[in-house]
Amino acid sequence: MTGAARARVARLPLTVLADETMRDLDLRTPPGTEPYLAGPGVIQIGSAAKTVWSGLRIGWIRTTADLVGSLCANPLQALLSPPPLEQLIACELLADDSGFAGVLADRRARLRAQRDHLAQLLDGTGWTYELPHGGLTLWLHLGTATRAADLATRAAARGLAVTPGPHFAVDGTTLVHHLRLPFTATPQALGRAVRLLRECLAN
C-alpha cells in the first residue's frame, strides 16, 4: 500500500486494524520506505513470530492509550500472556537496535534466496505467479484446468501438505485455481515439493 493510500485510510472515521506483521520482511533491495499506517483510529499489529522466528510467539499492539485501555478492559475472550521467557527474549532482542537489524538482515537474505530458488523451480511448469516483494509465501496460479483443492488432496496422499487458495478466501469459493506455497523451507525441501506437485498433476 502506497504512502498516499495509507494516509487516506488513516483519515477514515473508522477503527482500522493494520496488519504490519510482515512489514519487516520486505525483500526488495533496498527495502521500501512506505510509512506506517498511523492515526487516532489505527491499531497496528506486529509479531516476532513472523519477523524473527516462528517459535518466538510474541505479538504486540501499537495504538493510542485510549484504545489500549478499551482493548484491555474488553478482551474478546481472555487476555493472552506468552511465557515469561519468550517475553524476555523478545524484549532483549527489540531493545538492541544493532542486534535486531542484524537478525532482520540475515532473515531477509535467507528468505530472498529461498524465494528466488522457488521461482527458478517453477520456471517451465506452465504455472504462473507474481514474484512477491516480501513475506513468506508465493501464490501460484495453476491454470483454469486445475483445481487447487484437488491437487492439494493428491499431494497430501504423497506426504506433502499445501493449502489451496479457497482456505484464504472470504467466501471460500474464490481462488479455486490458486495454491499458496511457503518458501521458508530449505532449497532441498522446496525442490522435492515442486517435483511432487508436478508428478501429482501429471498423474
Image (cartoon, helix red, strand yellow):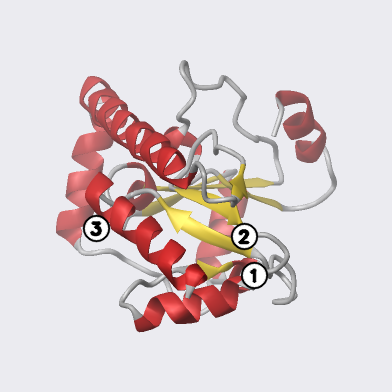
Could you tell me which secondary element the residue under label 1 belongs to?
A: loop
Q: Position of residue 191 (x, y in %)?
A: 31, 51
Q: Which residue is mark 3?
A: 55
Label 3 vs label 1, nearer the camera? 1
Q: Is residue 123 above or below residue 165?
A: above
What's under tag 1, amino acid-wise?
Answer: Thr
The residues bearing labels 3 and 1 have C-alpha atoms spaced at a distance of 34 Å
Q: Residue at x 48, y 81 (%)?
A: 153
Q: Which residue is mark 2?
A: 142
Q: Residue at x 25, y 29 (%)?
A: 106
Q: Residue at x 36, y 42 (%)?
A: 51
Q: Mark 3 or mark 1: which comes first in sequence?
A: 3
Q: Residues within 10 Å of mark 1 (few under 14, many from 20)?
A: some
What's under tag 3, amino acid-wise?
Answer: Gly
Could you tell me which secondary element the residue under label 2 belongs to?
A: loop
Q: Residues within 10 Å of mark 2 (few under 14, many from 20)?
A: many
Q: Position of residue 8 (x, y in %)?
A: 82, 34
The residues bearing labels 2 and 1 have C-alpha atoms spaced at a distance of 6 Å
- Image position of 170 (left or right of 68): right
